[in-house]
Each structure stands twice: as C-alpha cells, then as structure tokens.
Amino acid sequence: MKTNIGISDSNTQAVAFQLNKLLANEFVLYTKTRNYHWNIAGMHFFELHKLFEGQYEQLQEIMDEIAERIRAIGHYSEARLVDILKLTDLLEPEYTNEEKEQLSNLLNDHETIIRILRTLISEFADTYKDLGSSDYVTGLLRQHEKMAWMLRAFLK
C-alpha cells in the first residue's frame, strides 16, 4: 500500500536511498566491531572486548531502526550483502588484532558516519521536507559521537 505521509514519492525515494546507504555503513561498522570483539589481543583485552561488545550491540539496534525507518516511509531496506557492499562508504582493512589499529579503524568509521549524518540532517529537512527522518538521524549523530568519544579515549 502506498504511503500518504505528506512527503512526495520522489522525496521519500531519495531519503530511502540515503538511509539504505547509511544502513550499509552501519552494517560494515557492525561487522568490523564484531570482528574486533572476537579477535582483540593485548594489554587491554578485557576492557576492549567489553567495549566492542557494547558497541556492536548498539549498532545492531541502530541497523534495525534504520531498516524500520525505511519501511515507515514506504520503501524496502537493502539487506543482501552484495547490495550492502555496493552502497557502503566504509572499507574493511586487513585483519588485525592490534588494539590501537582496531580502535583507530573504528574511530575513523564512526567519524565518517558522523560527517555523513551532519549532511543528512539538513538534506532530509531542507531538500526532501522529511523532518521525521531529519530528527531520526540527529539522534543517530549523538549516538555515534558518543561511541567515537569512547574509542578516542582509549587512544589518548
């Protein structure tokens, strides 16, 4: 059934595309965080193992919410790995169990997502007239800023 939520079809389609790109980025970051949780080694093993676990659980929740937001505006979520890899802005580096390298990789990804979210906030509100999605990604921005801060604190 077609949505009638006061936003044009072309605008919801554009927002859904951007949200699917965001979902792909979140999925890659989730996978990388989970990988590091499984493969961490070093002096701070226990603390980082727990930190990464908390963050991948939070990212899992974020992915579910993004997929549901896409559905709420009348579109489908991209969920095949082949599509996710085409849409993502993030890269997966070679395996590492070095804690500093893991932390830096995750921090860089969070900061990439933060920059994307800052752009989407105004784009969704001003260009596509979707204040709900703009508000939603504003909340995501705060979550990623906090996760980035936690990672950055370990690198000091």
Image (cartoon, rainbow, N blue to C red):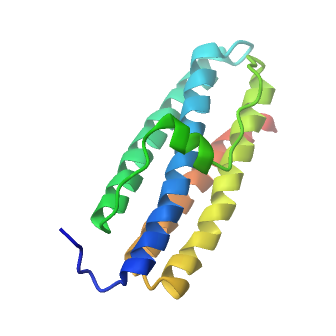
Q: What's the residue at 53%, 87% (across, down)?
A: 126
Please count the marks in the image. Answer: 0
| 92 and 83: which is toward the camera | 83
Residue 139 in sight in this render: no
Please state the horizontal and vertical placement of residue 46, each as a whole percent of the image: 60, 16
Place residue 9 in its image quadrant.
bottom left
Q: What's the residue at 64%, 63% (across, down)?
A: 116
Q: Is residue 145 left or right of residue 17?
A: right
Q: Is residue 95 left or right of residue 53?
A: right
| 107 and 133: which is toward the camera | 133
Please state the horizontal and vertical placement of residue 146, each as a whole percent of the image: 59, 51
Is residue 4 depicted above or below 88 in this figure?
below
Please state the horizontal and vertical placement of residue 117, each as a whole percent of the image: 59, 64
Q: Is residue 7 left or right of residue 86?
A: left
**As drawn, which residue projects farthest toward the left?**
1
Is residue 1 depicted above or below 45 in this figure?
below
Please state the horizontal and vertical placement of residue 93, each as a whole percent of the image: 76, 30
